[in-house]
């Protein structure tokens, strides 16, 4: 697996839209110190393709053998066509390649793994690429303190090869669409078509100004959803797989914010050393956050040994899921910094 | 639930709070700078300590420490 982040960095300490005290509280409690922000014109697909080029080079795979490409993102290159089709051509993958997009955010990596795994098991392809990435900063309003200082950009790729003898992956995937308004960009789709009014910036509350084309985040709603759903989801997965938390080397959470993940960690009674964070350096990178955390925080362990991992991701949808899997000395180059 | 323990836990969470300032009848928005992060800190502490979920509406309806404590008590498993 590989991950790419844009070069430009923004520091929470420099976010002068809010007071110094608020910035300090944000860094301490939400846990984001710096974020990578894609320059105009750089897309999630660009980051994922850069990661894929490096990974394919390291793996020395014959591209003609890759017959499945899944691109999981909420920031496609265009509204039409699917970005995966464009990426198939950019990477020089064969015409026999199945390529499609999945429009999920925070939970996207776990969903993508499940989808790729089951398609490969049914014989769709022996080799597959799962790309998960987002340019979330494209849709956050600078004058909205509830979103702007949280999100960072990133793109990842995971190369999967079917092996009959590989240990099983166990999944527990869930959805509750009743909460779809908790994280939403209201306009620009077919439900609320883009209009002149979509661009109007309105004051929502103190320190929060945004348009209907900006991401809206109901912090308390998402917080309570995460605390209500993630722990039962993880416990039920462990029970199904006849596994215990003691048997897990690392629990990798979606990097939502530190308050959420630390509360979940305490609820699951896992010691901090087994719960890695990339939040401090990269912020919340949406669906890319789980693989980006693995690449940046666990690279040595992933490349040198066998690991039992529990990955758990949750958010926009509302959609959430966990996977139990084993890795064994995987190929994982250092995180790539994107330059055009 | 013991109100003194609850107050002590709140004092531990918020650096700005001097011990002894908070009383059961204190209007918490007057002693803690009230913003979304502080709301999340309080919700997280209550979930971890008492396994009770406080909503945005609960916070809007509550004025004092006692108000919050009553809401927690009413939802705690016997």
Image (cartoon, coloured by chain):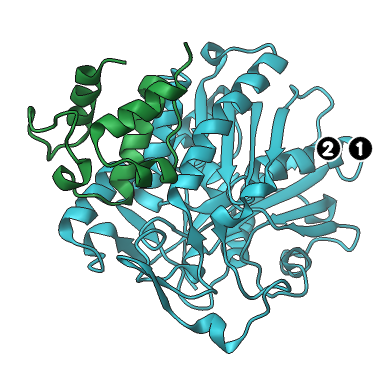
Chain colours: A cyan, B green
Q: Are marks 2 and 1 on the same chain?
A: yes
Please tell me how many numbered marks the rendered image carries.
2
Label 2, label 1: how far apart the Cα atoms are: 6 Å
Q: Observer-nearest residue: A99 or B14?
A: B14
In percent of width and height, residue A190 lies at 73, 74
Mark 1 crowd level (few <14, some 14–19, many ≥20, 10 Å Cα): few
Instruction: Kindly identify the residue that appears in the image at 19 percent across and 28 percent down.
Output: B24
Q: Observer-nearest residue: A26 or A332?
A: A26
Return the chain for callout 1.
A
Asked where in the image residue A69 lies, by quadrant, the reply is bottom right
Left or right of residue A301: residue A70: right
Instruction: Kindly identify the residue that appears in the image at 71 percent across and 40 percent down.
Output: A113
Can residue A274 be seen from the camera position used here?
A: no
Q: Which residue is mark 1?
A: A122
Q: Secondary structure at mark 1?
A: loop
| Vertical comparison of A161 with A244: above or below | below
Instruction: Kindly identify the residue that appears in the image at 38 percent across and 26 percent down.
Output: B72
Instruction: State yes or no: discs 2 and 1 in contact (Cβ < 8 Å).
Output: yes
Q: Which residue is mark 2?
A: A118
Instruction: Kindly identify the residue that appears in the image at 61 percent across and 74 percent down.
Output: A187
């Amino acid at each position: 697996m590989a991950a790419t982040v844009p070069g430009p960095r923004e520091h929470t300490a420099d976010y002068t839209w809010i007071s110094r005290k608020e910035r300090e509280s944000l860094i301490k409690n939400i846990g984001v110190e710096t974020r990578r922000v894609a320059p105009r014109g750089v897309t999630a697909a660009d980051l994922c393709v850069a990661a894929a080029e490096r990974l394919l080079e390291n793996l020395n795979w014959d591209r003609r053998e890759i017959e499945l490409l899944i691109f999981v993102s909420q920031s496609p290159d265009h509204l039409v066509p699917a970005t995966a089709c464009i990426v198939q051509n950019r990477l020089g993958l064969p015409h026999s390649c199945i390529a499609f997009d999945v429009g999920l955010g925070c939970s996207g990596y776990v969903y993508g793994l499940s989808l790729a795994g089951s398609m490969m098991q049914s014989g769709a392809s022996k080799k597959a690429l799962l790309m998960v990435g987002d340019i979330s900063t494209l849709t956050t309003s600078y004058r909205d303190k509830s979103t702007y200082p949280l999100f960072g950009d990133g793109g990842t790729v995971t190369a999967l090869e079917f092996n009959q003898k590989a240990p099983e992956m166990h999944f527990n995937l869930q959805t509750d669409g009743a909460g779809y308004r908790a994280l939403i960009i209201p306009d620009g789709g077919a439900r609320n078509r883009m209009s002149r009014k979509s661009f109007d910036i309105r004051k929502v509350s103190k320190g929060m100004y945004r348009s209907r084309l900006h991401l809206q985040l109901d912090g308390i709603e998402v917080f309570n959803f995460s605390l209500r759903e993630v722990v039962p989801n993880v416990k039920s997965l462990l029970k199904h797989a006849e596994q215990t938390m003691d048997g897990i080397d690392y629990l990798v959470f979606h990097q939502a914010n530190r308050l959420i993940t630390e509360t979940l960690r305490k609820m699951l009674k896992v010691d901090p050393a087994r719960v890695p964070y990339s939040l401090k350096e990269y912020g919340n990178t949406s669906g890319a956050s789980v693989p980006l955390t693995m690449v940046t925080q666990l690279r040595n362990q992933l490349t040198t040994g066998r690991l039992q991992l529990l990955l758990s991701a949750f958010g926009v949808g509302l959609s959430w899921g966990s996977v139990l899997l084993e890795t064994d000395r995987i190929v994982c180059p250092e995180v790539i910094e994107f330059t055009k | 639930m013991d109100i003194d323990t609850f107050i002590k836990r709140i004092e531990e969470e918020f650096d700005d709070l001097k011990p002894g300032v908070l009383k059961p009848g204190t209007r918490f928005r007057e002693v803690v700078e009230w913003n979304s992060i502080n709301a999340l800190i309080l919700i997280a502490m209550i979930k971890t300590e008492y396994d009770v979920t406080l909503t945005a509406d609960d916070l809007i309806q509550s004025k004092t420490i006692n108000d919050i404590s009553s809401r927690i008590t009413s939802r705690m498993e016997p």
